[in-house]
Image: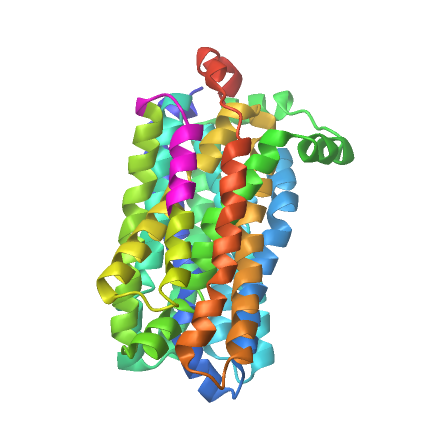
Amino acid sequence: MEKQNSRYRWVVFGTVLFTYFLIVSQRTAPGLISDQLMKDFNITAATIGLLASVQFLAYAGLQIPIGILSDRFGPNIFLIVGAILNGLGTILYSVASNEYILFLARLMAGMGDATIWVNLVLIMSQWFKVREFVGLLGFAGMAGSFGFLMATMPFSAWITLSGWRTPFFITGIILCLCGLLLYVVLVNKPKKMFKNAAVKAKKEKKRENTFVLLRRIFSERQAWATFLCHFGLVGTYVGFIGSWAVPYGMHVYGMSRSDASQLIMFGLIGAIIGAPLTGWISSRFDMIKKPYIIVHTIVFICWVAFLIFNGKPSYYMLVILFFIIGYGNGASSLTFAVVRKSFPMKDVGVISGFANTGGFLSAVLLPSIFGKVLDHFHAADSTVGYHYGFIIPVLFSMVGLIGGFLIKEQRQEAKQPSELMA
């Protein structure tokens, strides 16, 4: 395909990844000000957990519909609208005067966020060859991890200097501008450059009955395996980092906000390394299942370690645990390598959405349940609440490990790359 041989595909790749980087930063940046919001708006820990969950609930609930619509109508328009909607939600969050506006703002941000990853996968499938896809997927995962990284020390320092409203307002403006840039890069310019390819794609597009499609997906063991894998790795990491990691460092270890953000940074460094390194290992040995099971097992053991040490391991062990758990989140890009190798291109969007639903359903449940546990033990020492709270990611990561064992290796697909071409 002409698109897959053009230099312009790198412009597309860079623009989409930059937008992804910014959007991901706004998944966890609100976690930096959890305690501040509790003071400013006089709300409980459970409410903060629910606030974090609202964004991920919108994300999780829209994954399958977005996947279906993107497979049918193309990923471009949904990515553009999503970036703008996320930007508007972030702006609204920055000017909120009560908790109801905060909830609306995070709902908007979650709806915008729901469009990014599924459509990123589809756009990469259209613009890059199969051999390039798995490696670049690792770099896409890195971009997301850098987004999380920006929402630690840099964003925390900005909040300290100017208060929390200004950083969110400016980031929202930039996201809206990214939406306009995406229109130029994905729609306007390619219309002039690839007229014949666009006409051909429209002629070849066939639609399948939505009910039949969903019934087929829900009966696929491989689809459920990817769902459970993402539930165990992504949700535990994103759910905890995005809501309770900074308060955990401040309350249990007596850290400042900046120091707690720095602690989280070690997990993000692990995530940055995890995406490309695990992808390389998988490609090097031509297998996905075994390395993925190893990652799930190690992450499960790390969450168990928090229970063993009563919610307060030593500082140096804490750094190691966060690093490894972050590595696991980065390695979760293998979920979509499984999707790409196991399903025809016409189903990649909806299966990716289904898998992503697992991760963010977990991210919806964890902050809220964790917050309720903390509220239940509010009269006790802070370590007690967190100790019992860590039971949740232990159980969730066990679900992910089960998903890893359910994966069916698909090596035969490598012999038929034409079936996977966009």
Question: Residue 353's quadrant in the figure?
Answer: top right
Relative image position of residue 373 (x, y in whole percent): 54, 73
In the image, 215 versus 175, the foreground residue is: 215
Which residue sits at x=46%, y=27%?
A: 194
Q: Please tell me which residue lies in front, 25 or 16.
A: 25
Front position in the image: 341 or 196: 341
In this view, the residue farthest toward the left is 316
Residue lying at 47% horizontally and 37% vertically, measured from the top left: 335
Residue 325: image location, x then y, percent: 36, 52
Q: What residue range appears in magenta?
A: 284-298
The dominant secondary structure in magenta is: helix
Residue lying at 30% horizontally and 30% vertically, measured from the top left:
280
> Left or right: where does residue 202 sit relative to residue 239?
right
Q: Write the residue at 52% across / 88% down.
A: 42
Q: Report if residue 403 lies within the magenta region.
A: no
Residue 97 versus residue 302 in the image, above or below:
below
Q: Quadrant of the N terminus?
A: top left
Which of these two is toward me, 158 or 287? 287
